[in-house]
Amino acid sequence: TNYYNGVKARYLAEAGIQEAIARLREHVKSSAFDYEGEEWCAGATDAEWISESAPVYTVTSNIATNETATVEIVDEQRKININNASQQLLRWLLYNVSRHVCGDDPGNYGELPGNAIPDAQEISNNSPYETIEQLKQLDVFQENELFYDSFKEYVTVDSYRDRNSSYRSPVNINTAELWTLRSLFRYDYDDDDYDMIQWRINDLSEAIYDRVHDGGNPFTTWSDFKSFIDTYDGGVSLFDNDVVEGVNSNFN
């Protein structure tokens, strides 16, 4: 019956979640960093709005009938926490999501909201949020459902917050999406400065993303990350030390 199948599906899903928790707890004993190529990740599936994969656990209840349930585990630390992100960071994220949805044609940027400073102000002024769905109430997202559907994949209210700092919710550089990386590297610049270094930021963000996701070579230490930035060809020659420190504070 449908009821019986529903109960089995629920127990399978719960089993998958418990297995995931157990594996993650065991993993943290031997490693202080996470990325999606580790042994505890049993597989991957594509999400609709993100090019990255998420860890997936498949649990089998009856080998003879091969009844399975799949549980997807998403690293919330790969996203930007909207409850303590600066307005400038939110503005760059809005800009990048607009570009992601519209494509690379600058003439398309005006077709969706998210390009103006007031949009970031509206998000910031209405925080804190208990759920991402509360963003739907804002004017910037009521105007375009497609824009909301894309933006929500890059933000969270559930990620770790550094209690020693009122503003810091560091993003996991090993699981962050490309558009998130671009936003984090841009946040400390005004429009004029950004015009000068846009291509460098894009190239550096892509190099970081490719190294982790395509090359399977995650960053395991801060010195490794800093060395990659300092030595990347064309990456940060225009970044002064203050900017580098500001950018680093956004990563974990």
Image (cartoon, rainbow, N blue to C red):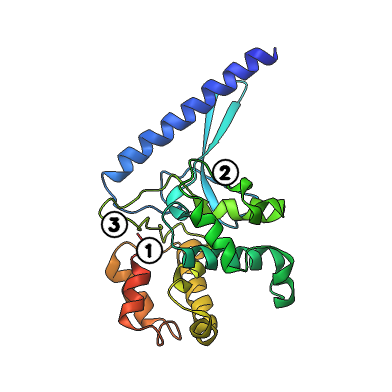
Q: Give the residue number, with chain letter if any, for mark 2.
A: 134
Residue 26 place in picture, x, y as percent: 31, 39
Find the distance from the CA under tag 2 to the CA under tag 1: 24 Å
Q: Mark 2 near mark 3, Cβ–Cβ under 8 Å?
A: no
* Residue at horizontal 48 percent and vertical 73 percent from the top: 186
The numbered dot on residue 130 is none
For mark 1, give the secondary structure: loop
Q: Amino acid at mark 3?
A: Ser
Find the distance from the CA under tag 3 to the CA under tag 1: 12 Å
* Residue at horizontal 37 percent and vertical 58 percent from the top: 170
Q: Is residue 63 visible?
A: no
Nearer to the camera, 213 or 109? 109
Between discs 3 and 1, the one toward the N terminus: 3
Please tell me how many numbered marks the rendered image carries: 3
Q: Give the quarter of the image for residue 40.
A: top left
Q: Give the residue number, with chain letter if any, for mark 1.
A: 250
The numbered dot on residue 165 is 3
Residue 200 place in picture, x, y as percent: 50, 82
For mark 2, give the secondary structure: helix
Crowd band around label 3 with a 10 angstrom C-alpha radius: few (<14), some (14–19), many (20+): few
Q: Is residue 6 visible?
A: yes
Find the distance from the CA under tag 2 to the CA under tag 3: 25 Å
Between discs 2 and 3, the one toward the N terminus: 2
Residue 172 place in picture, x, y as percent: 40, 57
Q: Amino acid at mark 1?
A: Asn
Q: Amino acid at mark 2?
A: Gln
